[in-house]
Amino acid sequence: MYNRSKGRRGDRQGMDKTMSEGPAAALPHPGERPTLKTIAFMTGLGITTVSRALKDAPDIGAETKERVRLVARQIGYQPNRAGVRLRTGKTNVISLILSLEEEIMGLTSPMVIGISEVLATTQYHLVVTPYRAQGNALDPVRYVLETGAADGVIISRTEPKDPRVALMMERNFPFATHGRTEMGLIHPYHDFDNERFAYEAVRKLVERGRKRLILLQPPPYLTFYLHMRAGFEKGIRDFGAMALPFNQVNLDNNLVDIRKAAESLFSAPDGPDGIVSGSGGGAVALIAALEAKGRKLGHDIDMVSKEPHMFLQWLRPEVVTMREDIRLAGRELAKAVIGRIEGTAAAELQTLSYPIPTADA
């Protein structure tokens, strides 16, 4: 049991020691990191009390904790990760492994913001590890597992039979995925309902009198390709439209290639009169292609596009947009991986978000 009188003596002794060493010993030199001693000097508390306040110890008063945290934030205090790891075996790091393709699609920044919003209230820090989709997606995961570089991992661009998921489950390592798998394994995830997006997109186009539709779809090896394709084909059947082939390119192709492929398609006399685009970036390339061929968006052809921001809606109001909230995805993924670290069952850490239509959609 904590001895309050002894605790006060210990704090007083710690404070006296810090103060006796003087400001020069307590305050960091320019370029040096603030330490617990710095906070102790600035608050007039003992180093032990400061340390326990930062760890949210139950025997430290709320007012003291708030004072310590305020000073820590003001001076930019960060715990020494090497020391934390030696004492606890933990790194207090969450590793977000993202492909460079996601940066091109504009997904990285809002996801990082969402994750950071959750981690800001915890002891965890975010480290972003980029890789190219053409490389081995297992390599950055193996690195974390073999070096103990993080306490948990967030991955994206999931595949139906994803070897990264299989490896981390085999090692019983905490993780969460942006996207689902089809492996019969229960793991934490957050996903966007791409099937509903594509189905609703077809419905909106048919309501505008469009019948010959194309889909700019994800790469076939990713799980969300299966979902988006299923929704598109179901919409085609349910609403009496016709799907035209557009398989030369997908969302992983650069915008120049997407535009070239679309220009060829729009040159045909029996070309599409409706477009479903799986990304805002892809939509820009498609718009450039149809305008190069003298076709007018909203008159000769209509488009429904998914986008993570509102830029397309603002710049091209003729396009019907449905937003995927990537910032929300970041928050949900952060909560999921922390929950897994803390022992929450994986089945309780699975969430799904839905398309957010624009006001006039």
Image (tube, rainbow, N blue to C red):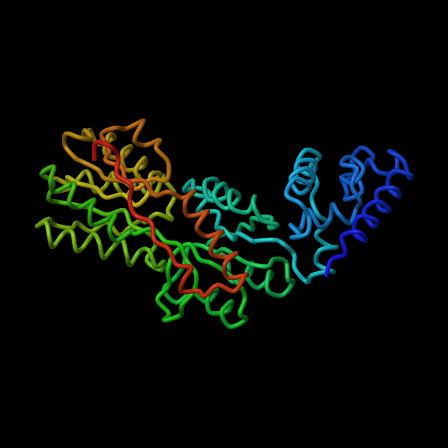
Dividing the picture into quarters, in which one does residue 323 lie? top left
Task: Work out which quarter of the rendered image holds the C terminus and state it.
Answer: top left
Dividing the picture into quarters, in which one does residue 142 lie? bottom right
Query: Residue 305, relative to residue 239: is it above or below?
Result: above
In depth, the one of 176 and 35 nearer the eye is 35
Taking the spot 49% from the left edge, 41% from the top edge, the residue there is 113
Horizontal arrangement in the rendering, residue 280 relative to residue 206 (left or right): right
Q: How many labels were placed on the picture?
A: 0
Taking the spot 59% from the left edge, 59% from the top edge, the residue there is 151
Taking the spot 26% from the left edge, 35% from the top edge, the residue there is 358
Residue 93: give x, y in percent of width and height: 61, 53
Horizontal arrangement in the rendering, residue 253 relative to residue 60 (left or right): left
Task: Work out which quarter of the rendered image holds the N terminus and state it.
Answer: bottom right
In depth, the one of 295 and 62 nearer the eye is 62
Residue 24: give x, y in percent of width and height: 88, 34
Residue 77: give x, y in percent of width and height: 70, 40
Horizontal arrangement in the rendering, residue 148 relative to residue 347 (left or right): right
